[in-house]
Amino acid sequence: MSKPNIIILATGGTVAAKASDESTSTDYKAGVLSISSLLKAVPGLDGIAKLSTEQIANIDSSNMSDELWLKLAKRVNSLAKSPKVDGIVITHGTDTMEETAYFLNLVSHTNKAIVLTGAMRPASAISADGAKNLYNAVYLAADEQARNKGVMIAINDKIYAARDVSKTHTLNIDAFKAQNSGEIGYIIDGKVFFSHDPVKLHTVNSVFCVRGLKKLPKVDIVYSYANDGSKVAIDAFLKAGAKGIVVATSGAGSIHENSKNHLIKLLKAKKLVVVKSSRVGAGLVPLGKEDEEQGFISANDLNPQKARVLLMLALTKTQEGKEISKYFELY
Ligand code: ASP
């Protein structure tokens, strides 16, 4: 059997970072090594796939932008159409990996495997995790079972669905979790094991599309906290052109009255779409009757940064609260 063609799109991150010496794992510059130099540390990949690489960017992913997402998504869609590509691996910083993965999950129209991976330790560190993660990601992208699963993250031997995963530790190599649903599989010594499928709509079943899109509607995030002062931020975001706000509520949808009353006024005046997520990290946000009447939308169990991704894409389709709510149920 001929080997699958896997393309690696590199965007930077700690996986491509270098520190001053081997014992330094936190003070480093991310996004400095090229994908070809990273591959030198991963033996045996030639045996499982015909690899090609493309350096899309080389950034610390904390600097990810909507523009780069659009560029990446357009490239992924065009590559996925090619019969010469069987699967796509994307190397990425871990900070915003979950956001990029979810964005691609919603706008990549293919059932071919798309796998993001990265590292928590720079490539120069003792026990750097990048090489193994990259090895696993290529194995996963080359495996037939990985088709139709939506975009995935392969990290620390585990496989996560893009919608459900988030970064939950600042430094540990076991930094990712899917708090509400768990990982969907794992990889051991080049063997891929899946335990379940993601249930929400993705990729080929998604209505969202980046074709012809030059920019995304502006959506920002505010955080609810004791003595909340985000009214100032909300007005500034609105002035800067925000069409939507995601609130990281303090629990199951509670917003400090300081900003809640202001948001209700803005909703009434139809100035903004407002989605309630939660800063808690697990569980969903239910809407009360009053919330619905006031026009709030629930992010369900999407965290604020992912709710922002879906709201931006939803706003490319409609301004209607009820339709946007439906998207939050389906995706
Ligand atoms: N700052 C890094 C980034 O997101 C962190 C990492 O990659 O682990 O690019």
Image (cartoon, rainbow, N blue to C red):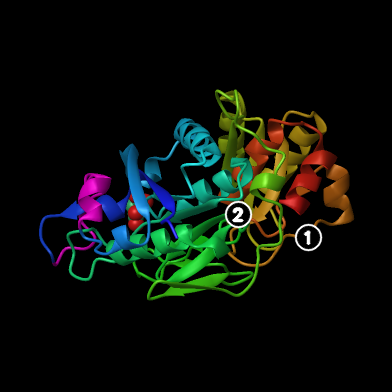
Q: Nearer the viewer, residue 54 or 331?
A: 54
Q: Residue at x 27, y 47 (%)?
A: 35
Q: Residue at x 59, y 25 (%)?
A: 213
Q: Position of residue 30 (x, y in %)?
A: 26, 48
Is ligand 1 within 8 Å of the beta carbon of the residue shown at mark 1?
A: no
Q: Is residue 29 magenta?
A: yes
Q: Nearer the viewer, residue 214 or 112?
A: 112
Q: Position of residue 153 (x, y in %)?
A: 48, 59
Q: Position of residue 155 (x, y in %)?
A: 42, 65
Q: What predominant SS class does the magenta segment belong to?
A: loop
Mark 1 or 2: in front is 2
Question: Which quarter of the figure has residue 104?
Answer: top right
Q: Nearer the viewer, residue 141 or 276?
A: 141
Does residue 225 appear left or right of residue 324 in this picture? left
The answer to whether any part of residue 121 appears in the image is yes
Q: In the current view of this chain or complex, which residue is farthest to the left?
A: 21
Q: Nearer the viewer, residue 36 or 69?
A: 36
Q: Which residue is mark 2?
A: 150
Label 1 to label 2, Cα distance in Å?
26 Å
SS class, disc 2: loop
Does residue 107 appear left or right of residue 173 in this picture? right
Q: Which residue is mark 1?
A: 286
Q: Is residue 225 magenta?
A: no
Judge whether 243 appears above or below 305 on screen: above
Amino acid under label 2? Gly
Does residue 115 appear left or right of residue 189 in this picture? right
Classify mark 2: residues with Cα within 10 Å, few (<14), some (14-19) or many (20+).
many
Stretch of the chain drawn in magenta: 23-40
Amino acid under label 1? Pro
Does residue 238 appear left or right of residue 6 in this picture? right
Is ligand 1 within 8 Å of the beta carbon of the residue shown at mark 2?
A: no
